[in-house]
Image: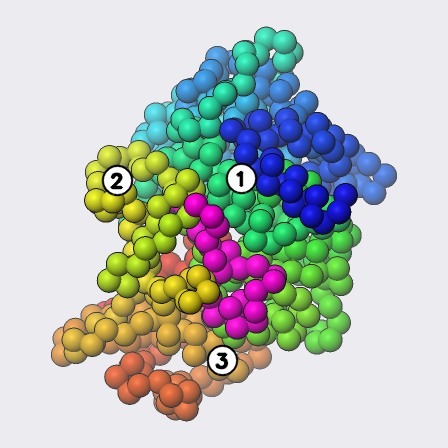
Amino acid sequence: MTDTAHVDTAHELGASRTLWELVERRAALTPDRPVFLQDGLQDDLRGNRVLTFGGLRERGERVAAGLYGMGVRAGTVVAWQLPTRIETVLLSFALARLGAVQSPVIPFYRDREVGFALRESGAEFFAVPGAWRGFDHAAMARRLGARGVFPAYDVLPDGDPAVLPPPPASGTSVRWIYWTSGTTSAPKGVLHTDRSLLAGGSCLAHALRPSASDVGSVAFPYAHIGGPDYTVMLLLYGFPAVLFEHFALPDALDSYRRHGVTIAGGSTAFYSMFLAEQRKRPGVPIIPTLRLLAGGGAPKPPEIYHAVVRELGCRLAHGYGMTEVPMITMGSPDDTAEDLATTEGRPPEGMEIRIVDGEVRLRGEAVCRGYLDPSHHASAFDADGFLMTGDLGHLTASGHLVLTGRLKDVIIRKGENISAKEIEDLLHRHPGVGDVAVVGVPDPSRGERVCAVVELRAGASGLTLAGVVAFLRGEGLATHKLPEQLEVVDALPRNAALRKVLKYELRERFGG
């Protein structure tokens, strides 16, 4: 198949009405090609676990039949808290086959977050892995009084697909409840449809333009909204990805090499982790087959882009998304180096971006249908139906989006607005800085003062406030934006999904 035909096929598949229809259409085209690979039990001669596109359809229907036998129907709310495994993908698509409403929960969440999700969603069933990584999820489910608890790790429900009703014909009903990360407040239940997830995944896929010979990777929790986002790309373009049940470097590098991964990433924090490993052996590629890092979830400092290209020897295409809109813009390997370094890419056709008083607002098919709590919906959308993201930015003449910070990340010092992101981007150039977060903390005379919280780069030491200020002066930062407080930490606090920095914890810790 020529590259043009490959892309045309992907665009045609993108017109699928539902996720299950997309599975059926891809399975008809390439039933024997793998969609997911995972190290573990020996399913083939290389010791890999393999799920093909045809297997996703066939085994997904058997799991759907087993769930149907348990009483799961179209509209039944099923929560699941499962690690990134082939079985998790099968369960999720089996639920999509039935038209159930599924509520994925990040597997690292505990009683407070899980109890909140179960109560708010009204889940009638709850799939858990049992004891996983030293924690008993089944015992937690009992403590929380969860209904319909069943294990879904090695063994899944099974049945005869002959009992199944027809799959859903429409993809516009709410069938997904995703949970915001709760980095600034209690989590919010975000309502999605098959079509909104298809639109988000299509944006990712068509920007990256993968080929059938690529091998991707899912190193983040599949329960994150990036899970279906990434799977849509695999289904559209017909190539596989390696699943990582537990991601840690350098241990995961063997799997990347063994499977010949060509596309890796996840978020800015993942780029930094790959760079840290590469710096242990400069000039020796840690993943020889790697051609592209891609991800989103958090802003990307330009210096990270240049370091990846220079040290890892591959391209970096970064995007912009959130739980409410799984993919808003995405960089493309065909973009200029300047656009890849300084922007979040362009929006796909159908995604409207409006900048109002510096705030990015969105309208389009990939935007969620609102929130489980209607009061959240009322405060999130403007009168024209645009989602108010809380992110600040502007569009370039070429249509690329530049993010400049968050409304809540604007530090107001003596009445002057200061962008935390501007300072963070400059500090990423400092040779002693591994990662950094800049926050505003209360100050009796200034209102807020600028506080830089730094993770040191491996081998670095002796970072001082005076040294940081001198460096930033040398970079041309205005005097009123210079940090007045420096904190050096072993590790910045992060959430469990894409490792976003929890700035509210830093404000609480260092704002005294």
- Lateral position of residue 308 relative to residue 489, left or right: right
Q: Would you say residue 327 sits in the magenta stretch?
A: yes
User: Percent x, y for residue 223?
Assistant: 50, 40
Q: How far apart in space, not on screen, are marks 2 and 3 (Cα)?
A: 39 Å
Query: Which one is in front in this view, the residue at disc 3 or the one at disc 1?
Result: 1
Q: Earlier in the sequence, mark 3 or mark 1?
A: 1
Mark pair 1, 2: CA separation: 23 Å
User: Which residue lies under the disc numbered 3?
Assistant: 429
Up-down relation of residue 445 to residue 393 (above or below): below
Q: Is residue 266 above or below residue 367?
A: below
How far apart are the alpha carbons under marks 3 and 1? 34 Å
Answer whether residue 80 is visible to the viewer in this image. Answer: yes
Badge 1 marks a residue whose secondary structure is: helix
Find disc 2 in the rendering and name its residue: 377
Q: Amino acid at mark 3?
A: Arg
Q: Residue at x 26, y 58 (%)?
A: 356
Which residue is tagged 1?
228
